[in-house]
Image (cartoon, coloured by chain):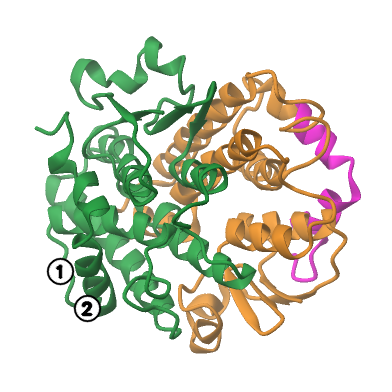
Chain colours: A green, B orange
């Protein structure tokens, strides 16, 4: 398997964690999101993913895009170390947690959005930071509230890591990177600490990637 | 089943289509996103969905949130009229199309984001419209490009409607509502027309909801 990745991409980070939890070896192909005007926007990469975003996974002749679709694919093809629980309502809970980050939180602070805010709209760096904090805090608060249903354990769902943890950790990394105070989210802080003890989460960390800077 | 919905919510619209395609009856409980400062933000509704967003589905004692998690749940519990194909790579393709809208496109023009842009950042109505057009055009162009892999048929994946069509149609509705020219996306226009002929898509349309204004 070949993963097109960028060390700091939250979406690629999610997939790296899932690959690690399932013990699947892969070749990392770095795509630099900033150099040369963004390598993801150039023709060679658009031939792999016409949406011009990382990650993309190539496996068995197919190219899979979108981090959550990739993780669901890995779950179906390599069911060992399941990242979704068995019961439909529990699976929905894990997916809803993941989507709270992947749909409601992360898209608002990705690279192209921040560029538009500072470039086209001309907002200041301070206003940009406030923007990021606004959506990260709202997303983390929602996630924390959803965790309060008694189904969290050592991890977001019970005592084994799931898709929800794969998506949460990169968002926690981003929040810390941009100075968001995590004290209001004690369950998230506790779960993130538990995740960080596992080799799969450690190996997927941006600082441990071949393209880390 | 009880669906907490708002007639114009794209996310609720997706779920209404899926329920219709599967022939599942449900009770619609309207949550008004604008009246009373936003009913989704008030205490009664937060007790149902702590993330304060529609839709939420109540079924068999469980509350499921996040539109794509709800549709995956419906797919698992009511497999008749499948909304995902059988092969893992094809399922991934359909999910990636859905996420191209649900993660990369729609979150940038939802109500709370537009409020922040015009309120906190004080941008003009013209700049707000340009913002929405920017992300809708980018998302639709990515979707159109992803459709170009030879696997689209009458619908996004082959000749039966899928999760991807459930997510596409509400985005097309939004794009038309805000004056985005759809001519550059001929596959999307063709598929949307095919969807619009089906009773499930018609019945889910905002104008046909009990809370339509």
Chain to which the residue tagged by mark 2 belongs: A
Instruction: Judge by depth and name the residue closer to the eye, A134 or A6.
Output: A6
**Residue drawn 46% across the image and 37% down it:** B135
User: Is B128 located above or below residue B141 in the figure?
Assistant: below
Instruction: Judge by depth and name the residue closer to the eye, B188 or B33.
Output: B188
Q: Which residue is mark 1?
A: A181
Based on the picture, tell me whether residue B110 belongs to the magenta stretch. Answer: no
* In this picture, residue A111 sits left or right of residue B197: left
Dominant SS in magenta: helix
User: Is A185 located above or below residue B163 in the figure?
Assistant: below
Which residues are the magenta region?
B190-213
Q: Which residue is mark 2?
A: A184
Q: Assign a secondary structure to mark 2.
A: loop
User: Is A175 located above or below residue B53 in the figure?
Assistant: above
User: Is A54 located above or below residue B106 in the figure?
Assistant: above
Based on the picture, tell me whether residue B201 belongs to the magenta stretch. Answer: yes
For the residues bearing labels 2 and 1, Cβ distance under 8 angstroms: yes
């Amino acid at each position: 398997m070949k993963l097109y990745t960028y060390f700091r991409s939250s979406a690629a980070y999610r997939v790296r964690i899932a690959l690690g939890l399932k013990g699947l070896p892969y070749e990392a192909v770095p795509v630099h999101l900033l150099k040369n005007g963004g390598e993801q926007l150039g023709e060679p990469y658009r031939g792999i993913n016409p949406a011009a975003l990382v990650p993309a996974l190539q496996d068995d002749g197919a190219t899979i895009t979108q981090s959550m679709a990739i993780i669901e694919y890995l779950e179906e093809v390599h069911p060992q170390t399941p990242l979704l629980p068995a019961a439909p309502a529990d699976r929905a809970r894990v997916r809803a947690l993941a989507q709270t980050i992947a749909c409601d939180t992360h898209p608002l602070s990705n690279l192209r959005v921040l560029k538009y805010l500072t470039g086209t709209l001309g907002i200041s760096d301070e206003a940009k930071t406030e923007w990021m904090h606004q959506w990260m805090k709202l997303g983390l608060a929602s996630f924390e509230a959803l965790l309060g249903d008694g189904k969290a354990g050592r991890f977001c769902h019970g005592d084994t890591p799931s898709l929800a943890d794969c998506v949460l950790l990169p968002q926690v990394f981003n929040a810390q990177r941009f100075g968001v105070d995590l004290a209001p989210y004690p369950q998230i802080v506790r779960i993130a600490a538990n995740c960080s003890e596992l080799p799969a989460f450690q190996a997927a960390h941006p600082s441990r990637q071949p393209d880390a800077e």
